[in-house]
Amino acid sequence: MNPNVLIPSVAAPVSADATAFLQYITVERGFSTNTVEAYSRDLKRLETFMKARGLAKAIALTSADLGNFVAWLIGPENGLSAVSAARTLAAVRSYLKFLQTEGLIKDNPGRLARGPKLWKLVPKTLDKVGAECLVIAPTEARSADASGCSRQKLTLRDRAILETLYATGARVSELCDLHMRDVNLDAGVVRLLGKGRKERLVPIGSKAIEAITAYLDKERQRLARGEASDFLFLSRGGKRITRQAVWALVKRYGRAAGIPSTASPHTLRHSFATHMLEGGANLRAVQELLGHADISTTEIYTHVDSSRLRTVVAQYHPRGRARSAE
């Protein structure tokens, strides 16, 4: 491992083994800064638990210890949700697997440790009309502003961002990291850098191409202020737009479009996947477009409204026709 690699300082664990693991996922696995910070917090929680229980090193952990660790996480001392506790346990499992690979432990206790029981939550989505209202909201705001101040509101950039999110199903971090070279408007594709620094090419439709073109022609040069930033979407200061800024603009335009306050950039990702499947797209194709490593993650989007299922059964099952049609 490279000792010069910087590990996030947020709740950084203190053990040498944990530091080596964080260096491994940073350098060799190419995990994002946000992911490494999350793992760092999780390992710090583990060390806090071990210290309270008189456990000196992770190599001494047993599956029973990990069960107590999960109970500690969701107990009154920490109050984590079952989802957060399960994610923390997953990080610890990866850490212990690393220790096993390095020959520091013989058996991985994480393999037998059980996490809290989780319900599979169906992601919140917008219907097609709601998604359309959200992505065109910046244009509506621009048209409604007769004073000309709309140019200062960066409505062309915001429309391009919303169109790109809905057209590609990109994660907000993937959108913020888009460079100019990652977008080929002539070919109609964007290159997204996903988890584990895995690249994928995602086609974009004519509406997104038009929105990005308008932004490039009329707003981006002004935002860049003559500097040579290669990021596609820029902030008012000419820097790479942040995840927080994208979240804020989705909330703002969502309110303008009458969208529920729970809408977020991820809502457009969920809507992209759901609308693709409802339109007849292959599940494997949607998995590839979303950049999911496991198709079971994509399968959660196969929920469709019951009326559509009834229509499909009535149309295709030999005994599924309604009585009135017999």
Image (cartoon, grey):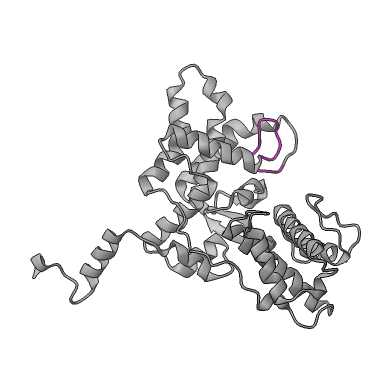
Visible in this render: residue 17? yes
Q: Which portion, as a residue range, is magenta? A: 230-241
Residue ranking furthest to the top:
147
- Image point (82%, 68%), residue name: 55
* On screen, residue 125 above or below 102: above
- Image point (41%, 64%), residue name: 302
* On screen, residue 36 above or below 21: above
Q: Quarter of the image holding residue 237?
A: top right
Residue 233 lies in the magenta stretch: yes
Horizontally, residue 276 falls left or right of residue 90, namely left
User: Which quadrant is the N terminus positioned in?
Assistant: bottom right
* On screen, residue 5 above or below 56: above
Q: Position of residue 130 (x, y in %)?
A: 39, 43
* On screen, residue 324 above or below 149: below
Seen from the viewer's position, the closer of residues 245 and 104 is: 104
Q: Position of residue 157 (x, y in %)?
A: 56, 36
- Image point (80%, 70%), residue name: 58
- Image point (43%, 68%), residue name: 282
Seen from the viewer's position, the closer of residues 108 and 215 is: 108
Residue 62 lies in the magenta stretch: no
Q: Main secondary structure of the magenta part?
A: loop
Horizontally, residue 165 falls left or right of residue 78, namely left
